[in-house]
């Protein structure tokens, strides 16, 4: 990047120079020349401290570099964000993962924003989402290939309404010999349809061990008897009689497990025969013959056609946010070259389902489910809009809303780039500052860099 020395030199970062707002501008908490109380202004390495009053502007360095370092910080996930967001939090959502830090939801000039590192696919309502169980795939889908023809894209565990079974993305796959079972971070003992799974699993294991003369087999069998306070196989069989488990169990016949699905009293996303408590209805003809009929809350919404971003429960149940179905939504894949996808706010999703979106929206972002990145999700609140629209109409309305969204004189993608600069931009600013004042800022350790990030070579930033 070329530089012109002296008073007439170019300012390569002028697009990032702040406007004069009370938070970001002159005299505000982020003004490098303003006196602030220690700890009020985040430091350039994300550790806090009164950096705003300590930073000086060495001769030859552009003002925007100094301003940028004072106005941005690294968060706990080693991503950069404007300190303006510290003043804009409207909700702090507790993480569903043990030890996870709360996730903030912001409101900036009317828009509702949150930031996630992965996106999840929500195919509820799709014609090929749910498929009846098969002997090979007892949960009605292939966990290793969601696009396999003849099998649903989602597990039937996700389709149960009552008694409830919480669905979470798979964390590890079975080894193929266990009927495609997927291990999930779920407390199975809490739910009627799975609370007896351990007993049935032990029962079938005991059946396979009862005639073995191996010492280890006899030891394991004795441990099982002791666990259930029985002394014979007959007593254990009595305890297991009538128990229900919809999870696949090694050694159990398929028909027994299939019969247990009849204990589901209401389905979510599947049309049932003879009312909610009936068996799921299966298509008998057409392209999707063999799949369950989808039950769509909004009849015209198809996740393979219509781009939508799910309103997770914490958002759609908060009346103050006014975040209703059908309002414009935008997802940005944040990076040196940003990708923007336009959508609408879909039906209310589950608790913690931040970043869930339709297949059509993932396709627009050219992104796979579970891909790690930096995704900025934005809603523009307003009244419910259930009017049927095709994909182009949905995208056009969201694009107009996004490009007219104005914050401190910036619009649309410029706002996102200012609120959420890339890590490369952050390092560029810090390196440029250090070239002129190496003693004022300690260059961050390599360990703070996001995984996979590489430091650009110094010659890219040298003066010519």
Image: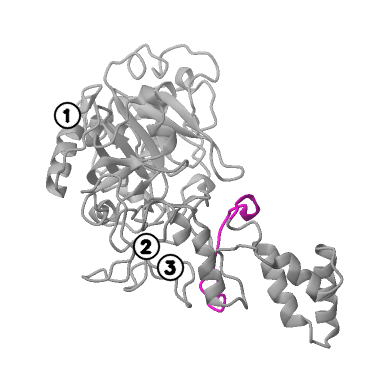
* Label 2: element kind: loop
Residue 416 shows in the view: yes
Neighbour tally class for label 3: few under 14, some 14-19, many 20 plus, Cα within 10 Å: many
Upstream in sequence: badge 3 or badge 1: 3
Q: Which residue is mark 2?
A: 130
Q: Which residue is mark 1?
A: 404
Query: Does residue 453 lie above or below 152 as drawn?
Result: above
Per the rendering, the mark at residue 453 is none
Neighbour tally class for label 2: few under 14, some 14-19, many 20 plus, Cα within 10 Å: many
Closer mark to the observer between disc 3 and disc 1: 3
Q: Main secondary structure of the magenta part?
A: loop
Give the x, y percent position of residue 216. Answer: 83, 80
Task: Decide whether residue 190 is among the magenta residues.
Answer: yes
* Label 1: element kind: helix
Residue extending furthest toward the front: 274
Q: Which residue is mark 3?
A: 140
């Amino acid at each position: 990047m070329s530089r012109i020395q002296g008073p007439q030199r170019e300012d390569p970062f002028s697009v990032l120079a702040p406007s004069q707002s009370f938070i970001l501008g002159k005299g505000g908490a982020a003004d490098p020349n303003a006196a602030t109380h220690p700890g009020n202004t985040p430091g350039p390495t994300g550790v806090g401290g009164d950096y705003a009053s300590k930073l000086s502007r060495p001769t030859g360095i552009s003002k925007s570099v100094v301003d940028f370092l004072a106005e941005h910080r690294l968060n706990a996930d080693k991503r950069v964000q404007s300190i303006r967001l510290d003043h804009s939090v409207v909700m702090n959502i507790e993480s569903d993962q043990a030890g996870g830090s709360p996730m903030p939801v912001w409101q900036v000039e009317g828009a509702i924003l949150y930031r996630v590192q992965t996106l999840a696919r929500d195919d509820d309502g799709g014609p090929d989402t749910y498929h009846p169980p098969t002997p090979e795939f007892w949960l009605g889908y292939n966990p290793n290939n969601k696009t396999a023809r003849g099998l649903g894209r989602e597990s039937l565990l996700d389709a149960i309404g009552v008694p409830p079974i919480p669905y979470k993305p798979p964390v590890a796959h079975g080894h193929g010999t266990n009927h495609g079972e997927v291990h999930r971070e779920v407390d199975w003992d809490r739910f009627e349809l799975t609370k007896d799974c351990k007993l049935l699993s032990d029962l079938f294991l005991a059946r396979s061990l009862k005639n073995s003369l191996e010492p280890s087999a006899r030891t394991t069998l004795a441990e099982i008897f002791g666990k259930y306070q029985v002394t014979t196989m007959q007593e254990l069989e009595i305890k297991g009689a009538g128990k229900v488990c919809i999870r696949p169990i090694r050694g159990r016949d398929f028909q027994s497990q299939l019969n247990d699905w009849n204990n589901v009293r209401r389905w979510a996303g599947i049309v049932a025969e003879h009312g909610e408590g009936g068996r799921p209805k299966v298509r008998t003809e057409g392209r999707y013959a063999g799949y369950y009929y989808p039950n769509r809350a909004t009849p015209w919404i198809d996740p393979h056609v219509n781009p939508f971003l799910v309103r997770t429960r914490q958002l759609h149940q908060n009346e103050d946010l006014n975040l209703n179905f059908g309002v414009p939504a935008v997802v940005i894949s944040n990076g040196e070259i940003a990708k923007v996808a336009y959508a609408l706010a879909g039906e209310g999703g589950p608790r913690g389902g931040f970043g869930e979106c339709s297949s059509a929206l993932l396709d627009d972002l050219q992104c796979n489910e579970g891909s790690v990145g930096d995704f900025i999700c934005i809603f523009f609140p307003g009244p419910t809009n259930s009017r049927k629209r095709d994909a182009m109409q949905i995208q056009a309305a969201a694009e107009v809303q996004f490009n007219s969204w104005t914050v401190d004189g910036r619009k649309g993608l410029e706002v996102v780039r200012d609120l959420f600069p890339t890590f490369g931009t952050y390092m560029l600013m810090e390196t440029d500052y250090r070239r002129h004042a190496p003693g004022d800022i300690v260059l961050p350790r390599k360990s703070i860099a996001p995984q996979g990030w590489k430091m650009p070579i110094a010659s890219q930033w040298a003066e010519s």
